[in-house]
Image (spheres, rainbow, N blue to C red):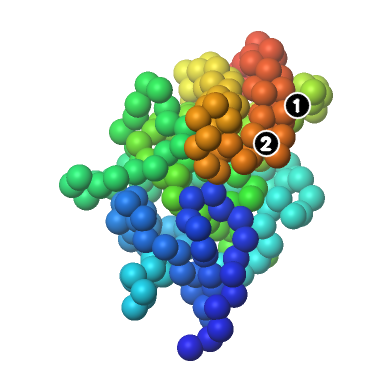
């Protein structure tokens, strides 16, 4: 047995380790749902393979070599198009997924309107492993019922990205590339900016609730200043709603 290498990052599992070509995570209430989801996605190259449980009861997953996208330069226009296509392929693949009965999910910012598509829930550069040939989204612990636009709205905020006090003349064309890469239709383009803003505001509200209730890890993230990013990011995304719509339907 290879030695355990502790992996950093992630907000749900307490201790995640690499052993050889595998990752081991504590099995939690929602793990069975994640396993079923990844089994369904076995033919989709953008997700890790699920490999059962080990003798400690931990969830075993394929280790994905490469660099996390948040350690690399911002995505180029061609890369934005590529990642949007990858997300479209993921959403399309999940359309035929039938969750196990009585499965538990752990979406940290669920769509308040609900949804019947099981989505990743945290499509962001810190969960995207890249190498030359394969791009893979990792950390599926926040998966749950959602909608395409809610899941995609968070991805747009983090991958375009739409940062606090951004430049809309730069960000709007990049958002258009992202939407084109995904293949949003006209009605989806009209609805998308409001969904982006609501999903981004949801991340801020999660941190505030954590601060107020002491729920971890959100209370710690609030203390570390994460809300100082997400609040202004939500403001920026909401304030430029009309510019986003204009860019998306031009």
Residue at 70 percent across and 39 percent down: it is: 224
Q: Earlier in the sequence, mark 2 or mark 1?
A: 1
**Are the two marked residues, 2 and 1, in contact with CB atoms closer than 8 angstroms?**
no
The answer to whether residue 219 shows anywhere in this view is yes
Left or right? Give the position of 241 relative to 114. right
Of circles 2 and 1, the one toward us is: 2
Return the residue nearer the eye: 169 or 112.
Answer: 112
**The C terminus is located in which quarter?**
top right
Residue at 67 percent across and 23 percent down: it is: 231
The picture places residue 75, in percent across and down from the top left corner, at 73, 46
Disc 1 crowd rating (10 Å Cα; few below 14, some 14-19, many 20+) is some
Left or right? Give the position of 49 relative to 227. left
The picture places residue 51, in percent across and down from the top left corner, at 37, 71
Residue at 48 percent across and 88 percent down: it is: 1
Please, is residue 179 above or below residue 73 in the view? above
Disc 2 crowd rating (10 Å Cα; few below 14, some 14-19, many 20+) is some
**Furthest residue in direction left, as rendered:** 101
Please, is residue 108 above or below residue 24 in the view? above
Return the residue nearer the eye: 177 or 233.
Answer: 233
**Furthest residue in direction bottom, as rendered:** 1
Label 1 element class: loop
The picture places residue 49, in percent across and down from the top left corner, at 42, 66
Residue at 47 percent across and 32 percent down: it is: 109
Q: Quadrant of residue 171?
A: top right
Q: Quadrant of residue 135?
A: bottom right
- How far apart, in angstroms, are the residues tagged by discs 2 and 1? 19 Å
Q: Which residue is mark 1?
A: 164
Return the residue nearer the eye: 141 or 250.
Answer: 141
The picture places residue 165, in percent across and down from the top left corner, at 79, 23
Please, is residue 211 above or below residue 244 in the view? below
Q: Which residue is mark 2?
A: 223
């Amino acid at each position: 047995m290879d030695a355990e290498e502790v992996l950093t990052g992630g907000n749900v599992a307490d201790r995640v380790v690499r052993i050889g070509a595998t990752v081991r995570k504590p099995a939690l209430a929602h793990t069975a749902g994640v396993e079923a989801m990844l089994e369904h996605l076995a033919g989709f190259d953008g997700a890790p393979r699920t490999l059962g449980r080990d003798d400690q009861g931990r969830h075993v997953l394929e280790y994905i070599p490469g660099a996390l996208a948040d350690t690399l330069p911002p995505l180029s226009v061609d890369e934005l198009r590529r990642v949007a296509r990858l997300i479209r392929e993921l959403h399309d693949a999940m359309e035929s997924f039938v969750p196990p009965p009585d499965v538990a999910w752990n979406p940290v910012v669920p769509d308040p309107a609900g949804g019947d598509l099981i989505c990743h829930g945290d499509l962001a550069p810190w969960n995207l492993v890249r190498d030359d040939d394969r791009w893979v989204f990792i950390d599926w612990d926040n998966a749950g019922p959602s909608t395409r636009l809610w899941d995609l709205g968070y991805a747009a905020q983090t991958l375009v990205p739409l940062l606090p006090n951004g430049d809309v003349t730069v960000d709007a064309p990049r958002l258009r590339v992202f939407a084109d890469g995904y293949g949003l239709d006209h009605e989806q383009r009209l609805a998308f900016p409001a969904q982006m803003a609501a999903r981004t505001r949801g991340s801020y509200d999660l941190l505030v609730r954590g601060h107020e209730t002491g729920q971890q890890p959100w209370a710690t993230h609030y203390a570390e200043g994460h809300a100082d990013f997400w609040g202004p990011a939500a403001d920026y995304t909401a304030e430029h709603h009309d510019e986003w719509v204009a860019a998306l339907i031009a």
